[in-house]
Protein backbone atom coordinates (compact mmCIF):
# COMPACT_ATOMS: atom_id res chain seq x y z
CA UNK A 1 0.00 0.00 0.00
CA UNK A 2 1.29 3.47 -0.92
CA UNK A 3 2.29 5.76 1.94
CA UNK A 4 2.33 9.54 1.34
CA UNK A 5 4.73 12.02 2.92
CA UNK A 6 5.06 15.71 2.17
CA UNK A 7 8.31 17.70 2.08
CA UNK A 8 8.22 21.37 3.04
CA UNK A 9 10.59 23.71 1.23
CA UNK A 10 11.18 27.29 0.23
CA UNK A 11 10.37 27.90 -3.41
CA UNK A 12 13.65 29.38 -4.65
CA UNK A 13 15.28 27.51 -7.50
CA UNK A 14 18.12 26.32 -5.27
CA UNK A 15 15.76 25.15 -2.51
CA UNK A 16 13.74 23.18 -5.06
CA UNK A 17 16.81 21.58 -6.63
CA UNK A 18 17.91 20.44 -3.16
CA UNK A 19 14.42 19.20 -2.30
CA UNK A 20 14.07 17.27 -5.55
CA UNK A 21 17.43 15.61 -4.86
CA UNK A 22 16.16 14.43 -1.46
CA UNK A 23 12.82 13.37 -2.96
CA UNK A 24 14.56 11.30 -5.63
CA UNK A 25 16.86 9.70 -3.07
CA UNK A 26 13.93 8.72 -0.89
CA UNK A 27 11.97 7.41 -3.87
CA UNK A 28 14.84 5.19 -4.97
CA UNK A 29 15.18 3.68 -1.48
CA UNK A 30 11.46 3.48 -0.76
CA UNK A 31 9.48 2.85 -3.97
CA UNK A 32 6.31 2.41 -1.91
CA UNK A 33 6.34 6.10 -0.99
CA UNK A 34 4.22 8.80 -2.56
CA UNK A 35 6.15 12.03 -2.06
CA UNK A 36 4.53 15.45 -2.31
CA UNK A 37 6.18 18.87 -2.04
CA UNK A 38 4.70 21.97 -0.40
CA UNK A 39 6.18 25.40 -1.10
CA UNK A 40 6.41 27.60 2.00
CA UNK A 41 7.33 31.29 2.14
CA UNK A 42 9.54 32.24 5.09
CA UNK A 43 10.28 35.56 6.74
CA UNK A 44 13.68 35.64 5.09
CA UNK A 45 12.02 35.38 1.67
CA UNK A 46 9.74 38.36 2.22
CA UNK A 47 12.06 40.89 3.89
CA UNK A 48 14.42 41.92 1.10
CA UNK A 49 15.01 45.60 1.90
CA UNK A 50 17.40 45.02 4.82
CA UNK A 51 20.64 43.07 5.33
CA UNK A 52 20.11 39.68 6.96
CA UNK A 53 22.24 40.79 9.90
CA UNK A 54 19.93 43.74 10.55
CA UNK A 55 16.81 41.56 10.89
CA UNK A 56 18.21 39.70 13.89
CA UNK A 57 16.15 36.51 13.64
CA UNK A 58 17.92 33.15 13.95
CA UNK A 59 15.10 31.28 12.17
CA UNK A 60 14.70 33.53 9.13
CA UNK A 61 14.40 30.70 6.61
CA UNK A 62 13.10 28.01 8.92
CA UNK A 63 10.33 29.00 11.35
CA UNK A 64 7.35 28.90 8.98
CA UNK A 65 8.38 25.46 7.71
CA UNK A 66 8.69 24.15 11.26
CA UNK A 67 5.19 25.48 11.97
CA UNK A 68 3.91 23.52 8.97
CA UNK A 69 5.44 20.36 10.45
CA UNK A 70 3.80 21.02 13.79
CA UNK A 71 0.47 21.46 12.01
CA UNK A 72 0.90 18.13 10.22
CA UNK A 73 0.95 19.65 6.72
CA UNK A 74 4.49 18.41 6.04
CA UNK A 75 6.56 15.62 7.59
CA UNK A 76 10.06 16.81 6.75
CA UNK A 77 11.92 19.88 5.55
CA UNK A 78 15.01 20.23 3.39
CA UNK A 79 17.27 23.10 4.44
CA UNK A 80 20.69 24.41 3.59
CA UNK A 81 22.13 23.48 6.97
CA UNK A 82 23.89 26.85 7.26
CA UNK A 83 20.43 28.48 7.42
CA UNK A 84 19.48 26.45 10.49
CA UNK A 85 19.89 27.93 13.98
CA UNK A 86 22.73 26.37 15.95
CA UNK A 87 20.19 25.19 18.52
CA UNK A 88 16.90 23.77 17.24
CA UNK A 89 13.55 23.98 19.04
CA UNK A 90 13.07 21.11 21.49
CA UNK A 91 10.49 19.39 19.30
CA UNK A 92 12.69 19.34 16.17
CA UNK A 93 15.67 17.25 15.08
CA UNK A 94 17.91 16.76 12.04
CA UNK A 95 17.10 13.24 10.90
CA UNK A 96 19.71 13.24 8.11
CA UNK A 97 22.77 15.12 7.00
CA UNK A 98 23.55 13.85 3.46
CA UNK A 99 27.14 13.82 2.19
CA UNK A 100 28.60 17.33 2.15
CA UNK A 101 29.13 19.18 -1.12
CA UNK A 102 31.86 21.78 -1.76
CA UNK A 103 32.06 23.93 1.43
CA UNK A 104 34.05 26.79 -0.12
CA UNK A 105 33.04 30.36 -0.89
CA UNK A 106 33.37 31.47 -4.51
CA UNK A 107 34.01 34.82 -6.17
CA UNK A 108 32.04 35.71 -9.31
CA UNK A 109 33.34 38.83 -11.02
CA UNK A 110 33.44 40.79 -14.25
CA UNK A 111 36.28 40.00 -16.64
CA UNK A 112 37.25 36.84 -14.71
CA UNK A 113 39.12 38.83 -12.06
CA UNK A 114 40.30 37.14 -8.89
CA UNK A 115 40.09 38.89 -5.54
CA UNK A 116 43.70 40.04 -5.90
CA UNK A 117 42.94 41.30 -9.41
CA UNK A 118 39.99 43.50 -8.47
CA UNK A 119 40.77 47.22 -8.82
CA UNK A 120 41.21 49.46 -5.78
CA UNK A 121 37.81 50.28 -4.28
CA UNK A 122 35.97 47.61 -6.28
CA UNK A 123 32.33 47.08 -5.27
CA UNK A 124 31.82 43.59 -3.86
CA UNK A 125 28.36 42.32 -2.93
CA UNK A 126 27.75 40.13 0.11
CA UNK A 127 25.02 39.93 2.75
CA UNK A 128 27.24 37.94 5.15
CA UNK A 129 29.13 39.60 8.06
CA UNK A 130 31.46 36.58 8.02
CA UNK A 131 32.40 37.13 4.38
CA UNK A 132 32.58 40.90 4.85
CA UNK A 133 35.00 40.53 7.76
CA UNK A 134 37.32 38.18 5.92
CA UNK A 135 37.16 40.21 2.70
CA UNK A 136 38.14 43.36 4.63
CA UNK A 137 40.93 41.42 6.30
CA UNK A 138 42.28 40.46 2.87
CA UNK A 139 41.45 43.67 0.96
CA UNK A 140 40.63 46.63 3.24
CA UNK A 141 40.32 48.90 0.20
CA UNK A 142 37.23 47.18 -1.18
CA UNK A 143 33.77 48.78 -1.09
CA UNK A 144 31.47 46.15 0.41
CA UNK A 145 27.78 46.45 -0.44
CA UNK A 146 24.83 44.45 0.81
CA UNK A 147 23.13 42.15 -1.68
CA UNK A 148 19.92 40.16 -1.18
CA UNK A 149 17.86 37.78 -3.28
CA UNK A 150 18.30 34.26 -4.63
CA UNK A 151 21.33 33.16 -6.64
CA UNK A 152 19.84 34.13 -10.02
CA UNK A 153 18.87 37.57 -8.70
CA UNK A 154 22.35 38.20 -7.33
CA UNK A 155 24.01 37.15 -10.58
CA UNK A 156 21.67 39.41 -12.52
CA UNK A 157 22.55 42.38 -10.29
CA UNK A 158 26.23 41.65 -10.94
CA UNK A 159 25.65 41.40 -14.70
CA UNK A 160 23.65 44.66 -14.65
CA UNK A 161 26.69 46.48 -13.25
CA UNK A 162 25.59 47.08 -9.66
CA UNK A 163 28.71 45.26 -8.41
CA UNK A 164 32.18 44.44 -9.67
CA UNK A 165 32.07 41.05 -7.95
CA UNK A 166 29.91 39.03 -5.58
CA UNK A 167 30.65 36.15 -3.19
CA UNK A 168 28.43 33.07 -3.13
CA UNK A 169 28.57 29.51 -1.80
CA UNK A 170 30.27 27.19 -4.26
CA UNK A 171 27.84 24.36 -3.46
CA UNK A 172 24.79 26.40 -4.43
CA UNK A 173 26.32 27.41 -7.74
CA UNK A 174 27.24 23.79 -8.49
CA UNK A 175 23.77 22.50 -7.62
CA UNK A 176 22.29 25.03 -10.04
CA UNK A 177 24.76 24.13 -12.79
CA UNK A 178 26.35 27.59 -12.55
CA UNK A 179 29.83 26.66 -11.39
CA UNK A 180 31.24 27.89 -14.71
CA UNK A 181 30.50 31.43 -13.47
CA UNK A 182 33.08 31.09 -10.68
CA UNK A 183 36.23 33.13 -11.20
CA UNK A 184 37.93 32.08 -7.96
CA UNK A 185 37.34 29.46 -5.30
CA UNK A 186 38.57 30.72 -1.95
CA UNK A 187 40.99 28.53 -0.07
CA UNK A 188 39.43 27.18 3.12
CA UNK A 189 42.26 28.60 5.20
CA UNK A 190 41.81 32.06 3.65
CA UNK A 191 38.01 32.30 3.77
CA UNK A 192 36.62 30.06 6.51
CA UNK A 193 33.11 29.06 5.43
CA UNK A 194 29.84 29.41 7.25
CA UNK A 195 28.94 26.71 9.74
CA UNK A 196 27.68 23.67 7.75
CA UNK A 197 28.11 25.40 4.38
CA UNK A 198 27.65 22.85 1.59
CA UNK A 199 25.63 20.50 3.81
CA UNK A 200 21.90 19.81 3.66
CA UNK A 201 19.96 19.31 6.88
CA UNK A 202 16.74 17.28 6.69
CA UNK A 203 14.56 18.28 9.62
CA UNK A 204 11.68 16.36 11.19
CA UNK A 205 9.65 16.42 14.36
CA UNK A 206 11.67 14.80 17.14
CA UNK A 207 8.92 12.28 17.93
CA UNK A 208 8.29 11.27 14.30
CA UNK A 209 10.19 7.98 14.37
CA UNK A 210 8.61 6.69 11.17
CA UNK A 211 9.87 9.57 9.03
CA UNK A 212 13.27 9.46 10.70
CA UNK A 213 13.58 5.79 9.79
CA UNK A 214 12.81 6.57 6.14
CA UNK A 215 15.58 9.17 6.11
CA UNK A 216 18.21 6.98 7.75
CA UNK A 217 19.54 5.87 4.35
CA UNK A 218 20.40 9.49 3.44
CA UNK A 219 22.37 10.25 6.61
CA UNK A 220 26.15 10.47 6.21
CA UNK A 221 28.26 9.89 9.31
CA UNK A 222 31.04 12.29 8.27
CA UNK A 223 28.60 15.08 7.40
CA UNK A 224 26.83 14.61 10.74
CA UNK A 225 30.07 14.71 12.74
CA UNK A 226 31.41 17.82 10.99
CA UNK A 227 28.08 19.66 11.11
CA UNK A 228 27.68 18.85 14.81
CA UNK A 229 31.14 20.19 15.68
CA UNK A 230 30.60 23.37 13.66
CA UNK A 231 27.12 23.94 15.11
CA UNK A 232 28.46 23.45 18.64
CA UNK A 233 31.10 26.10 17.93
CA UNK A 234 28.44 28.58 16.83
CA UNK A 235 26.07 27.68 19.67
CA UNK A 236 28.77 28.39 22.26
CA UNK A 237 29.45 31.80 20.72
CA UNK A 238 25.79 32.68 20.16
CA UNK A 239 24.26 34.59 17.29
CA UNK A 240 23.37 33.61 13.75
CA UNK A 241 23.39 35.63 10.54
CA UNK A 242 24.26 38.78 12.50
CA UNK A 243 27.73 37.71 13.69
CA UNK A 244 31.00 37.23 11.81
CA UNK A 245 31.67 33.62 12.72
CA UNK A 246 32.88 30.75 10.55
CA UNK A 247 33.91 27.15 11.14
CA UNK A 248 34.99 24.16 9.10
CA UNK A 249 35.58 20.61 10.34
CA UNK A 250 37.32 17.73 8.57
CA UNK A 251 37.27 14.06 9.53
CA UNK A 252 40.40 11.92 9.24
CA UNK A 253 39.96 8.45 10.64
CA UNK A 254 38.56 8.92 14.14
CA UNK A 255 39.84 12.50 14.49
CA UNK A 256 38.05 15.75 13.75
CA UNK A 257 40.04 18.87 12.92
CA UNK A 258 38.02 22.04 13.49
CA UNK A 259 39.07 25.47 12.25
CA UNK A 260 37.13 28.54 13.37
CA UNK A 261 37.09 32.32 13.24
CA UNK A 262 35.44 35.21 15.05
CA UNK A 263 35.63 38.67 13.52
CA UNK A 264 34.43 42.24 13.35
CA UNK A 265 33.18 44.38 10.48
CA UNK A 266 36.50 46.25 10.16
CA UNK A 267 38.38 43.07 9.24
CA UNK A 268 39.92 42.27 12.61
CA UNK A 269 39.59 38.58 13.45
CA UNK A 270 40.93 35.70 15.49
CA UNK A 271 41.38 32.21 14.08
CA UNK A 272 42.23 28.90 15.65
CA UNK A 273 42.29 25.14 15.16
CA UNK A 274 41.72 22.17 17.45
CA UNK A 275 41.68 18.41 17.01
CA UNK A 276 39.54 15.98 18.94
CA UNK A 277 37.72 12.67 18.92
CA UNK A 278 35.04 12.33 16.26
CA UNK A 279 32.92 10.62 18.91
CA UNK A 280 32.49 13.92 20.78
CA UNK A 281 32.06 16.71 18.21
CA UNK A 282 30.07 18.93 20.59
CA UNK A 283 32.96 19.09 23.05
CA UNK A 284 35.39 20.00 20.26
CA UNK A 285 33.19 22.81 18.96
CA UNK A 286 32.64 24.29 22.42
CA UNK A 287 36.35 24.05 23.29
CA UNK A 288 37.47 25.94 20.18
CA UNK A 289 34.81 28.60 20.75
CA UNK A 290 36.01 29.12 24.33
CA UNK A 291 39.61 29.38 23.12
CA UNK A 292 38.84 32.03 20.48
CA UNK A 293 36.54 34.00 22.77
CA UNK A 294 39.38 34.14 25.27
CA UNK A 295 41.86 35.27 22.62
CA UNK A 296 39.91 38.42 21.80
CA UNK A 297 36.87 37.07 20.04
CA UNK A 298 34.50 38.24 22.76
CA UNK A 299 35.62 41.83 22.33
CA UNK A 300 35.28 41.58 18.56
CA UNK A 301 31.67 40.42 18.95
CA UNK A 302 30.93 43.33 21.30
CA UNK A 303 32.51 45.77 18.84
CA UNK A 304 30.41 44.38 16.03
CA UNK A 305 27.26 44.70 18.11
CA UNK A 306 28.06 48.31 19.02
CA UNK A 307 28.36 49.14 15.32
CA UNK A 308 25.12 47.41 14.42
CA UNK A 309 26.95 44.64 12.61
Image (tube, grey):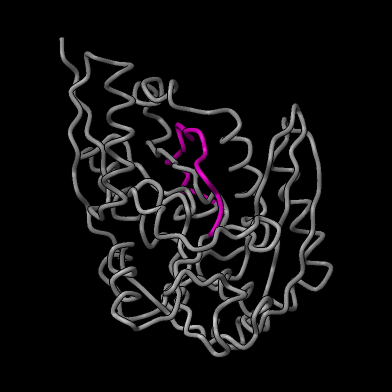
* Residue at position x 43%, y 80% in the image: 164
Residue 76 lies in quadrant: top left
Q: Please state the total of marks drawn on the protein image.
A: 0
Does residue 2 lie above or below 157 as drawn? above
Relative to residue 200, is residue 226 drawn left or right?
Answer: right
Relative to residue 185, is residue 66 drawn left or right?
Answer: left
Answer whether residue 93 is magenta in the image.
yes
* Residue at position x 50%, y 42% in the image: 101
Spot occupied by residue 220 in the image (x, y as percentages of width and height): 53, 28
Spot occupied by residue 235 in the image (x, y as percentages of width and height): 62, 55
Magenta stretch bounds = 87-105
Does residue 100 lie above or below 161 as drawn? above
Relative to residue 24, is residue 146 drawn left or right?
Answer: right
Answer whether residue 280 is magenta in the image.
no
Relative to residue 146, is residue 103 drawn left or right?
Answer: right
The quarter of the rendered structure image containing the N terminus is top left
Secondary structure mostly seen in the magenta stretch: loop
Spot occupied by residue 47 in the image (x, y as percentages of width and height): 29, 73
Foreground of the two, 254 or 298: 254
The quarter of the rendered structure image containing the C terminus is bottom right
Residue 267 lies in quadrant: bottom right
Q: Residue furthest top?
A: 1
Foreground of the two, 150 or 63: 150
Spot occupied by residue 222 in the image (x, y as percentages of width and height): 61, 32
* Residue at position x 33%, y 82% in the image: 161
Does residue 250 lie above or below 181 as drawn? above
Amino acid sequence: MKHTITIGTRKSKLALVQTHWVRDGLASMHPELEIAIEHITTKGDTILDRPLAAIGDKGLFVTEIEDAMRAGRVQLAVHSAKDLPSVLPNDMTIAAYPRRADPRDALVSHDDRTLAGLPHGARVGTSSPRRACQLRHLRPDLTLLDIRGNVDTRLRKLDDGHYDAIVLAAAGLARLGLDARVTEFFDLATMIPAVSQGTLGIETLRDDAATAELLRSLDNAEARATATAEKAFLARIGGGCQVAVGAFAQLTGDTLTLTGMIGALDGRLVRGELRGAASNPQQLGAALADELLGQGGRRLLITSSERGF
